[in-house]
């Protein structure tokens, strides 16, 4: 549990840093949650990489949990994603909400597949 908590702390801080940089750059003011999409995609990539790279290696279960459940879980923002969909729908931006949902799912799936492939190739 401590390993997951430590990984979660690092992931949460990384998410905060990315969100702060997005706000400072003006990405957050576009009306489209680019930073959440980016975090979900890069978090999915990292999870795919860690899950496939470490699946058969001698890495400790604690390190595996710290990286996958902790780091990736603290970093990714699916709950924020869900709330942003609701908020866009409430504001009458249904088309934008659908585009955001489709882009998030499709790009995150592609990222996790690429990460998993990279993890598998690095393992051999």
Image: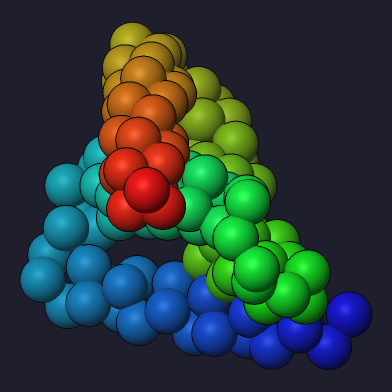
Q: Is residue 106 above or below residue 67?
A: above
- Measuring from the top left, give residue 76's x and y in whole percent: 52, 56
> At 65% across and 68% down in the image, what residue appears?
58
- Measuring from the top left, give residue 67's x and y in whole percent: 60, 69
- Measuring from the top left, give residue 86's x and y in whole percent: 58, 30
> At 70% across and 61% down in the image, what residue appears?
69
> At 42% across and 79% down in the image, what residue appears?
14
Q: Is residue 36 above or below residue 25?
A: above
Residue 120, quarter of picture:
top left
Left or right placement of residue 121 versus residue 60 in this view: left
Depth order, front residue of 14/70: 70
Q: Is residue 104 above or below residue 26?
A: above
In this rendering, does residue 30 appear at all? Answer: yes
Left or right placement of residue 10 versus residue 25 in this view: right
Q: Outermost residue toward the right?
A: 1
Which scheme is used to colour this image of the protein? rainbow
- Measuring from the top left, give residue 55's x and y in whole percent: 62, 50
Give the position of the N terminus as an image quadrant: bottom right
């Amino acid at each position: 549990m401590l390993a997951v908590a430590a990984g979660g702390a690092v992931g949460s801080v990384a998410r905060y840093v990315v969100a702060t940089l997005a706000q400072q750059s003006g990405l957050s003011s576009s009306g489209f949650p680019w930073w959440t999409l980016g975090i979900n995609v890069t978090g999915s990539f990292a999870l795919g990489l860690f899950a496939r790279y470490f699946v058969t290696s001698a890495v400790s279960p604690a390190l595996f949990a710290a990286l996958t459940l902790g780091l990736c879980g603290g970093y990714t923002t699916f709950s924020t994603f869900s709330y942003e969909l609701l908020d866009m729908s409430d504001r009458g931006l249904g088309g934008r909400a659908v585009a955001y949902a489709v882009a998030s799912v499709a790009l995150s799936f592609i990222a996790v597949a690429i990460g998993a492939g990279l993890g598998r190739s690095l393992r051999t």
